[in-house]
Amino acid sequence: MAPGRRVERVAALIRKETSELLMHGIRDDRVHQGLISITQVDVSGDLQHCKIFVSVLADPEGRAQVMEGLQAASSFLRGELGRRLQMRRAPEVVFHLDRGLEKGASVLGLLGDLERERQERGEIPPGSDDAQNCHDDEPS
């Protein structure tokens, strides 16, 4: 098996097992203060280090507490991953907050604000699809 393929497979297994542990294995109340989604798992080529990117749906204070709880549980998680995946040496686990969904929602909000402003100025009629208006003049 190619080394890259093995790393991908281990990353997928870590993601699956970590999801299970987040739901049922970690008892720290801080971890359960928000909705946690694992967005990405990066494993180093030597399988010694693992970055787990999570998105947390909570207020900023709750998000910070969830991240503290995850960092506190990382050694427990490492041991459990080693046992569940039957690895001689489980990778060191580090959690990172993924703000991609948050940024995406922010961009969508800004685009919505821009559309409302353009409608108020009369640049586009209310309820029209600006993209369709651009293509209406083109021959089919």
Image (cartoon, grey):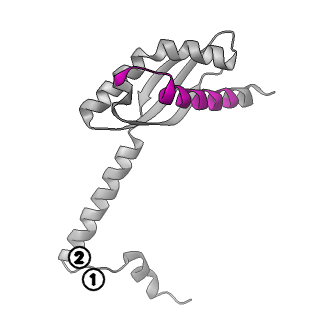
Q: Position of residue 33 (x, y in %)?
A: 33, 31
Residue 119 — which label? 2
Residue at (34%, 21%) from the top-left corner?
Answer: 68
Nearest to the observer: residue 89 or residue 132? 89
What residue is shown with label 1?
A: 125
Left or right: 91, with 35 as reference point: right
Q: Position of residue 138 (x, y in %)?
A: 49, 87
Q: Residues within 10 Å of mark 2 (few under 14, many from 20)?
A: some
Marks 2 and 1: in contact by CB < 8 Å?
A: yes
Residue at (31%, 51%) from the top-left corner?
Answer: 106
Which quadrant: the N terminus?
A: top right
Tell me which corner region of the image, top left, top right, bottom left or bottom right, holds residue 31: top left
Q: Is residue 12 magenta?
A: yes
Give the SS element for disc 1: loop
Which quadrant: the C terminus?
A: bottom right
Give the residue type that dot 2 points to: Gln
Residue at (26%, 37%) from the top-left corner?
Answer: 59
Classify 67 as above or below 132. Answer: above
Q: Position of residue 100 (x, y in %)?
A: 41, 43
Residue at (70%, 15%) from the top-left corner?
Answer: 86
Give the residue type that dot 1 points to: Pro
Q: Position of residue 17 (x, y in %)?
A: 59, 27
Give the SS element for disc 2: helix
* Residue range highlighted in magenta: 8-29
